[in-house]
Amino acid sequence: MGLSALVVRAVMALAAVAALRRVHPALGVAGAPVVAALWTAAGVYFPDLDLLLPLDHRSILTHSILPALVLARLGGRPAAGGLGVGTGIHLSADLFPEEWTGFALVQVPLAGSLDAFSPWWILGNAVLATVLGVAWLRTALPGAAMGRAFHLGIAALAGWYLLVEEGSLLAPVVFAGCFALAVRLSAPRGATGRTA
Ligand SMILES: [Zn+2]
């Protein structure tokens, strides 16, 4: 109960910051990294917001790239990029339930569960959310050094959440794969090869 209220307040505060970033450009250069960092951290928990809403747990509406896409329209790329990467971390953990039954299955409002397709949905959206998130962050953050700092921060956050909080050895491997792909795809042309 206490934790739920805290999560709701934190998300509302973050939404307010994202809105502020949009309507108040005076936040300027410092605004994007701050908003992106807050949304990355919040994104790790965001999909389980379905527990507080009139939705079945592991709702397809929150366990997907949909919230990040909505935020890309409403809150701009720093917020959407952070939420995308955070969602990728969360879904990497959700890929390893004790068994694929009951609460582990992805639920579609009014239509029931995705059943055997659930793991593929989770995996596909983990990849998409991470790839889109990293690409959005790259265009939203000022400078290559800031980008590298964010990549280190994301790796540290994912390692902490997946290894320590979730106690999973396989989830970090999945996220590392998503993240490596995302970084490679978002790299500026010519930056991925060796320099002559
Ligand atoms: Zn979840």
Image (cartoon, grey):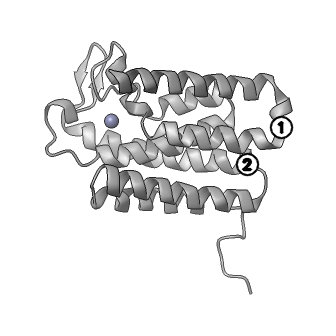
Picture coordinates of residue 26, whole percent (x, y): 86, 31
- Look at the image and tell me in which quarter the C terminus lies: bottom right
- Residue at x 13% of width, y 35% of height: 101
Residue placed most toward the observer, 26 or 80: 26
Residue at mark 1? 28
- Residue 64 lies, with reference to residue 157, above or below; the image says above
Marks 2, 1: nearer the viewer: 1
Most distant residue in the front direction: 2
Task: Sort mark 1 into few (<14), some (14-19) or many (20+) by Cα contacts within 10 Å.
Answer: few
- Residue at x 36% of width, y 62% of height: 173
In what quadrant does ligand 1 lie? top left
Residue at mark 2? 141
Task: Sort mark 2 into few (<14), some (14-19) or many (20+) by Cα contacts within 10 Å.
Answer: many
Q: Disc 2 on helix, strand or loop?
A: loop
Residue 151: name its quadrant.
Answer: bottom right
Residue 3: name its quadrant.
Answer: top left
Picture coordinates of residue 130, whole percent (x, y): 50, 48
Picture coordinates of residue 140, whole percent (x, y): 72, 44
Picture coordinates of residue 77, whole percent (x, y): 67, 37
- Residue at x 67% of width, y 28% of height: 18
Identity, as a three-letter code, of the amino acid under mark 2: Leu
Identity, as a three-letter code, of the amino acid under mark 1: Gly
- Look at the image and tell me in which quarter the N terminus lies: top left
